[in-house]
Image (tube, rainbow, N blue to C red):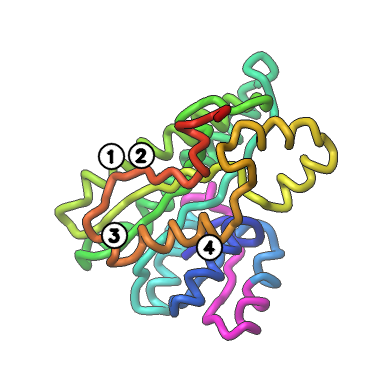
Amino acid sequence: MVTGAARGIGETVARFLGRQGATVVLTDLNPQVEETARGLAADGIAAEAKILDVTDNAAVMRAAQEIGNKHGHVDALVANAGISLELTAIEHDVESWRRVMALNLDAVFFTAQAFARPMLARGSGSIVMISSISGVGISRPERHVSYDVSKAGVAHMARSLGVEWAKQGVRVNAVGPGYTDTQMLAEVGRAKPEVLQAWLSDIPTGRLLRREEIASAVAFLLSDAASGMTGHLMMVDHGYSVGKGV
């Protein structure tokens, strides 16, 4: 199951996993997820869609049960859904802060909790949470403190749960994507080319990541090839987090 899979990194992750032979369930609050799943199915991927608000914990618990009943069990979860609000610390109010935390942090935990229950009972499963370069450092020139804090929380959540669930056979890891060539970033580049140039100047390779580069890292962490890894944050950022400005 992949959350936030209507488009962007979530869509690409679902497609990549499907091409490796997985049956993928794409979830999103955006109804576009149904069209996305049909597109994957047209390409020969075993894919289906479920409209789901991951901030609604009762709905998430129902989804975990329904998907598990339909497919026998869920082997892997990718907690990808998230938002970023371009607000400075002073501009934030309680509502905007809670909106980000509800989706980026709270929903990640309760989605992991719901889908981990049967994994723990079965003694196997793999979870990957999507963090960010903003979870380990401060990017420029944007200012989104709520996003930064939430993604740092996701990374540490993966560490904590990865240790807590290790002896029960469930691995939890996180991927920290750098600036990735998505529709959202393309829109920023067209509207504010100076911002795009600032990003590129701070990336050691001088280019944006391809979505497939994120997806392949997620697939690796989910797979048995990463059986020795849990509680790990894998940065996929072209060296941004360690070599900014090289």
| Mark 4 Cα-neighbour bin, 10 Å: few <14, some 14–19, many ≥20 | many
3 vs 2, front mark = 3
Percent across and percent down for residue 177 are 52, 45
Circle 2 sits in a helix, a strand or a loop, which is it? Answer: helix
**Residue 154 located left or right of residue 6:** left
Which mark is nearer the camera, 1 or 3? 3
Magenta-drawn segment: 37-57
Kind of residue sitting beneath label 1 = Ser
Mark nearer the viewer, 3 or 4 = 3
Disc nearer the start of the sequence (3/4): 4
The residue type indicated by label 3 comes to Ala
Q: Is residue 181 left or right of residue 113?
A: right
Could you say whether the residue bearing mark 4 is in a helix, strand or loop?
helix
The label shown at residue 226 is: 3
The numbered mark at residue 160 is: 1
Position in image of residue 114 (x %, y %): 37, 56
Which residue is tagged 4? Answer: 13
| Residue type of the residue flagged with mark 2 | Met
Q: Is residue 44 magenta?
A: yes
